[in-house]
Image: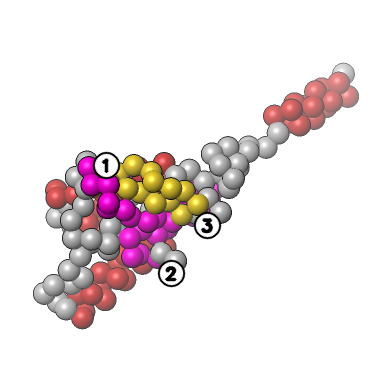
Amino acid sequence: MKLILAAILITSLFACGTPNKDSNNEQGMDPQISLNAMNDYVKSGSALKDPAKWVRNNQLLSPDFKKGYDKMISDAYKDDPEMGLGFDPILNAQDFPEKGFEIKSVDSKRGLVVLQGIDWSDFVVKTKLVEVNGQWLVDGAGVIRMPK
């Protein structure tokens, strides 16, 4: 009886297999994460008195993204206490498409997702996704932590 139960257990383990990391595309990366994060940012847009608070509390952003954002903002205010950066580093712009974004292109090998404005089709923002502890997160956007 024990032998039969062991055989059933082993068979069921192999039948279930391991989760397929490639379920969304080649690397398991889900470009929808970039889209959701940037659309939430735009939706919050003008209501954000402190974008840094949005960054700190957003669960779709990697810890390294958050550190990079904080450092960039801090350094900018040290250099120019009145103006800071003078633009939004997440979108790499001063203005943004108010209706949000749609996915323009995906490079899953490099983790890059390019988003295009819905109501402003010539506006694009590049994002980068990385896997952190089994979860895909935005690790770069606009001018924050983006590859050259």
Report if the CB atoms under discs 2 and 1 are less than 8 Å apart.
no
The residue labelled by disc 3 is: 110
Badge 2 or badge 3: first in the primary sequence:
3
Magenta-colored span: 118-145
Tell whether 113 sits left or right of 28: left
Q: Quadrant of the C terminus?
A: bottom left
Q: Residue furthest left?
A: 82
Return the mark for residue 148: 2
Image position, residue 7 (x, y; %): 84, 25
Which residue reaches farthest bottom? 79
Front label number (1 vs 3): 1
Residue 102 coordinates in the image, percent (x, y): 34, 42
Return the disc, 1 or 3, that comes first in the chain's sequence.
3
Question: With respect to residue 81, does 112 lie above or below?
Answer: above
Q: Gap between marks 1 and 3, in whole Å?
A: 24 Å
Q: Residue furthest front?
A: 122
**Viewed as shown, does residue 44 lie left or right of 133?**
left
Figure quadrant of the N terminus? top right
Residue 50 shown in magenta: no
Residue at point 22% right, 42% down? 119
Q: Amino acid at mark 2?
A: Lys
